[in-house]
Amino acid sequence: MPGINVTTAVRTGPTGNGDIVAGQWFVVGEAERGDITKPTLCRSFSDYVREYGDYQAGNLYQYVKTYFDEGGTRCYVQRVLGASYATAAKTFQDTAGSPANTITFTAKNPGKWGNTLSVEILTSADATVAISGYFRVKIYLNSVLIFTSRDLKDVPDAVNFINNSRTVNHLIVASNESASALNPKAYAATALTGGANGTNAATAAEKVTGLSLLTEDLKNGAVSVPGVYDNTTRDGLLAHAEAYNRIALFAFAAGTSVDAAITAASSEYVDTAASYTGYYWPHIKVPSPSTTELASYVAAGATATTAEPDPESATVTIDPTCYAAAARARAIQASGGPWRPGAGAISAARTIVDLNQAASPASGDRLDEGRVNALRKIGNSIRVYGARSVSGDETNWKYITLRDTINHIVYGVESRMEEFIFNTIDSRGNLFGRIEGAIVAFLDPMRIAGGLYEARNDEGKLVDPGYTVLVDATNNPNSQLAQGIVKCTVGVRVAGVVDMIEVEITKSTLNAPVI
């Protein structure tokens, strides 16, 4: 079919004589509320709270909060639920002598949170409704009034007004019941009912299905399913990263020993997706949510509102993928692209209280050798202290930034080639020149920013800029052009990473020269 196909390859051998979208994080998990059919882009933690609600143990709240607290800027959230979930709703009747259904209010998305929504209807008998025959709607969340409509002429007017109100259209949907054309009668605040989260928490398979909703058009970035460490989720995460040119961030269960972490990572060394994957150890401790951050809900069949219990300590222990994602985003913002790792000084924690387990220098070295990125305390600063991928091919993919940069190039080249699809192929090479120019215009700023490694001779003169772009008759014979295919060959030399600095200090005596 028509389109663009970008493939990548590896070449080894000696060297010859704003928001930046790449920094975004994709995350899948459970939340108090929110869409389960597609992801939502959150540019701040307040965006997350608006769409996905408050803290419940094990949900995404604390992960997304930590991501933004630690410097992240863009986060796509995909909520998942276990089987047998249900959506809360309530139908209201009209003013006829034999009342008929006239308007229904339904929670915007499933879950027991919807049972905390209440609707009050005021008719013109109420002094607040100024126009005779009209009505008003009030909507409550957790018994707190969050919306009052203007005077509404009829049900279609109410449906249009409520469903287009940014104040509540992310929480509730109004719909017209065809059984009646009359306005609803007066109702005291009446709760929606029937909302349920499902009989069990989302399974690994359901979370992997959630990954499939993070489609290719959302572009590159890092992706995680935090708090889950089973093989099904891990394999699904790695497969997703490889298929969509993203970086998979994975961790281990809380309390996993250094030896166990290394052993678990070693099973991935030869996986085809290993170069797309970074492992992080140990868990981190972040401040517990305040009472006002705790989710409130009415369980299906219950009558009283229940609040999430207060955490039992001042901190909550969570896995470090959110922190790794934020550190990565910080580094990308600072450098202009994913060639600088989110490790070292730039990753210094801002809000993380402590590490769940300490990593000594010796343990850190062992983890690095085992291709696991340690989180360590350097002085009084908590930092990501590794930039490894889990790939066993250390010649080509030792550092996660190498694959991250290639992913960035894949998406960047593909985006810039879209304008040339369905152009005319001319015999003078004009199309070839325009394609080459567009790719060079993308790659050269990367070179200037340090993402591509220039080759220079012994005199310091530039031999090549760290990239080549070939699109001419040599790789586009007429037989190929006759099939509507133009081929462009791009070679890049991605800049490496320094993870060891060796300093030799020589002391001189008072009467000896300093060397």
Image (spheres, grey):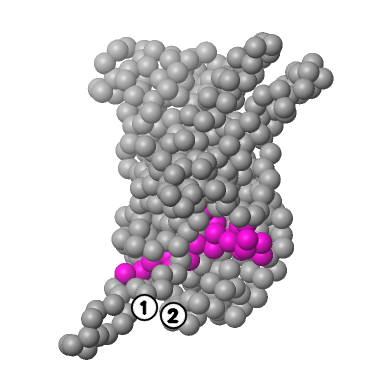
Nearer mark to the viewer, of 1 and 2 = 1
Q: Quadrant of the C terminus?
A: bottom left
Residue at 50% x, 77% y is 365
Mark number, residue 235: none
- The residue to which callout 1 is attached is 504
- Read off the magenta span: 381-401
Q: Residues within 10 Å of mark 1 (few under 14, many from 20)?
A: few
* Label 1 secondary element: loop
Residue 402 in the figure: left or right of residue 501: right
* Residue farthest toward the right in the current orientation of the protein: 479
Residue at 57% x, 74% y is 369
* Residue 55 drawn at (x, y percent): 42, 56
Q: Is residue 176 visible?
A: yes
* Residue 436 drawn at (x, y percent): 57, 26
Is 236 magenta? The answer is no
- In the rendered image, the vertical position of residue 184 relative to residue 43, given as above or below: above
Q: Is residue 98 visible?
A: no
* Label 2 secondary element: helix
Q: Quadrant of the N terminus?
A: top right
Q: Residues within 10 Å of mark 2 (few under 14, many from 20)?
A: few
Tell which of 202 and 268 is nearer to you.
268
* Residue farthest toward the left in the current orientation of the protein: 510
- In the rendered image, the vertical position of residue 168 relative to residue 351, given as above or below: above
Precedes in sequence: disc 1 or disc 2: 2
Residue at 36% x, 69% y is 382
Give me the C-alpha separation between circle 1 and circle 2. 19 Å
Is 394 magenta? The answer is yes
Mark number, residue 361: 2
Q: Count the marks: how many?
A: 2
Residue at 43% x, 15% y is 157
Amino acid bearing label 2: Pro
* Residue 178 drawn at (x, y percent): 59, 17
